[in-house]
Image (cartoon, rainbow, N blue to C red):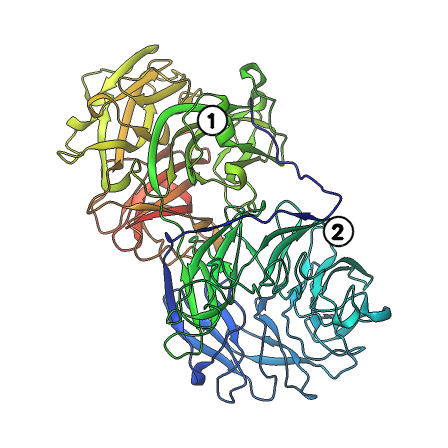
Amino acid sequence: MPGFRVRKVVCMAIVFCTAAAILSSAQTLTTLWNFGEAIGANPLSAPIRASDGNFYGTTQYGGGCNEGTVYELTPQGTFSVLHNFCGDGSFPWAGLVQGSDGNFYGTTSQGGGCNEGTVYELTPQGTFSLLHNFCGLDGSYPWAGLIQGSDGNFYGTTREGGNGYGTVFKVTPSGTLITLYNFCSQRNCMDGAFPYAGLVQASDGNFYGTTEYGGLAGTEGYGTIFRITPAGALTTLYRFRQMEDGEMPMGVLVQGSDGDLYGTAVSGGPSDDGTIFKISLGGTFTRLYSFCLGSCTDGALPAAGLLQGMDGNFYGTAIHGGSGCSGEGGCGTVFKITSNGTLTTLHQFAGSDGISPYGLVQASNGSFYGTTYDGGTNNGGTIFSLSPVPEQFVPVTPCRLMDTRPQYGGGGPIPGGTFETFNLPQLAQNNHCASLASAAAYSLNVTLVPQNGAPVGYLTIWPAGAKQPVVSTMNSLDGRTKANAAIVPAGVNGGVSVLVSNTANVVLDIDGYFAPAGGQTYEFYSLAPCRVIDTRSLGGQFLTGGHERDFSVLESPCIPQGANIKAYSFNVTVVPHRAGQPLGYLTVWPQGQQQPGVSTLNNLTATTVANAAIVPAGTNGGIAVFASNDTDLVVDINGYFAAPGQWGLSFYAGVPCRALDTRSNNGQPFAGEKTVNVAGSFCIPPSSAKAYVLSATVVPQVPLGYLTLWPDLEPQPAVSTLNAVDGWITSNMAIVPTANGSIDAFASNPTHLVLDISGYFAP
């Protein structure tokens, strides 16, 4: 069966589904910066990652007048104060938003002409402009930040002012402010009072937010969730009931990929230590989790909102709780929670690394970045990063997970411009493949089968539940069947989502997966790219169509002697033995095992085709190959998987990110050698990375004989990464070692090159 789409289940009543917490210690927290009074202190929000790749944020105190600052931090750790508040605004509680014009916009909770807060603009170079002074009737004390709406204006809230209980406002980029709503317009403040958090614009175009108080019990109530139209019509969606579902929702809501809104209440719930909830746009409320203070290590008092990560799960912080320090109530935690309510504690702060974290942002390298209000070396708070979970490889017998083609039991092609979500653990069970229950990421071979040879602009695969990344896995503008390897993190319920720009069938085969380190997991050992098989140099011993051929890979001088290899990282290339000879498919699998019903690549148009493949080692370390038609075979190696050891590396998944596009800014194609500084790209893989997982795409200007990727500072190896001798756009996954954060590329003919990074290997 071809898998199934994820469908949202709508409940008609409040639902409670609190689950037990899990403690994880696999992630590493690094303190990037310690705040101090002179340079800013006590940040109350996470930084944002701007379009230039740097982090920008605010501190509530410190700076020249001790009224707060705006700061910049580069990924390399260079810290700068861009602005010291001093009467032009004071004590910014909220962080920044980068506008479509590239400038930053924010609020201060006090200061300005009436000392009741301001809206300001700041360029990346530090030029400051005061856009609006709040003065009571139009609002007072904006504790929340701004968001830019789809109309280009900025929207936010003030905690007080208006009728005395807060407002919702709109402000243009030039500073014209319109009050959209005054809270406590209804009797006893049934509509809410004192909006602490900011707004989110949902997919329906309306804005959603919360109030800290008001609701069922008037101004002393427990808070509300509201919807407000861009024109200012407000609807109260939910009123909190304290011990049942939480009170004082102080964090901004986030809309998940399932369309529901997710948020936190800083207190209330059964233990009165805060809750996590979700609510549909129609108002169906579900309490997902209740925190517990005291002996509990999961955290307490989640004051900030949530972030949906690249894996489709949600991440957040609690300002108290945990067992990392002996301070009153604990120093706070970082946690992950699924959309079903299973919570995992990722880090417990110890004081020296910070106290009271407020919110997170995830960068393209997979790491989370955030701030703590207190603690650190100067006791003024910190900026920290939390690395992704390290994973190791588990080889499995190659197996077909799904094929959408009806003649093979599938449900039909994926319609163009849409995506379908597939539950891979369930599909593995249905198709008698190895269990994928513990998989955190999959090693897949993805085959795109266009409808009747029609062009397919692109295919993209990503974790189920996460936002679609702005990258492609492969293209088939000539309408031919194509395959590409992909390492894809497991998303919600272990699923992956596949989108095709044009209607097409899709086939998914698996050869292994990545999981947290255990007794049956293996580390990666990178090698300088090296050719292990080339039938063209074996006296004409090409592959005969319809017959299995075994190769003893360990005999190659490319392989270290004595290596107990469990799987190889190959680049497999087929070259027609006779001009014009098409190849239906080629399959590579462990020697000594029965030939699996999978394919590694296809060459129906009789050109030269390459595809990356992770192949488990078979009998005596050998591999078996089957070609449906006569063909020559070339196999290059760039690493292998074996038992953990001194030089072994783990895999770290990242958010798919474009590290290079030579077409950008009217760039020119290149031929010959080109050095690419991957570590210095927007994707910021860490300096510890020893190999990158890349999707390489060439856009040839003329037929391209070959492209080769290899580690910078090393001689160009006699291998190829891909070929495009027919001149069409071509992609291939490549695991490329690096010693200095850079790699080299050689193109035999002029071409543009796109490199997307999806993860890296590091100690």
Q: Is residue 674 left or right of residue 183?
A: left
* Mark 1 element type: helix
Residue in the image at 40% along x and 26% along y: 434
Q: Quadrant of residue 509?
A: top left
**Residue 461: horizontal and vertical position, in percent?**
51, 38
Of 686 and 426, which appears nearest the observer? Answer: 426
Asked if residue 725 is positioned above or below residue 241 in the image, the reply reads above
Which of 751/501 is in front?
A: 501
Return the x and y of residue 452 as percentages of the image width and height: 58, 20
Towards the viewer: 451 or 553 = 553
Above or below, comparing residue 710 to residue 266 in the picture: above
Judge whether 55 appears above or below 528 on screen.
Answer: below
Q: Could you tell me if the residues under marks 1 and 2 are in contact, i.e. CB atoms within 8 Å?
A: no
Q: Which mark is residue 178?
A: none
Which residue sits furthest right? Answer: 187
- Tell me if I can see residue 8 in this picture: yes
- Dot 2 falls on a residue whose secondary structure is loop
**Image coords of residue 201 (percent x, y):** 69, 57
Residue 748 visible in this rendered orientation of the protein: no
Query: Would you identify the image quadrant in which residue 732 lies?
Result: top left
Mark 1 — residue?
A: 428
Residue 750: image x %, image y %?
38, 42
Q: Could you tell whether 205 is left or right of 317 in the image?
A: right
Quarter occupied by residue 698: top left
Q: Quadrant of the N terminus?
A: top right
Residue 545 located left or right of residue 293: left
Name the residue that disc number 2 marks. Answer: 283
Nearer-the-camera pick, 158 or 348: 348
Dot 2, crowdedness within 10 Å: few (<14), some or many (≥20)? many
Residue type, numbered disc 1: Ala
Indicate the amino acid at tag 2: Gly
- The crowding category of the residue bearing disc 1, from other C-alpha atoms within 10 Å (few below 14, some 14 to 19, many at least 20), is many
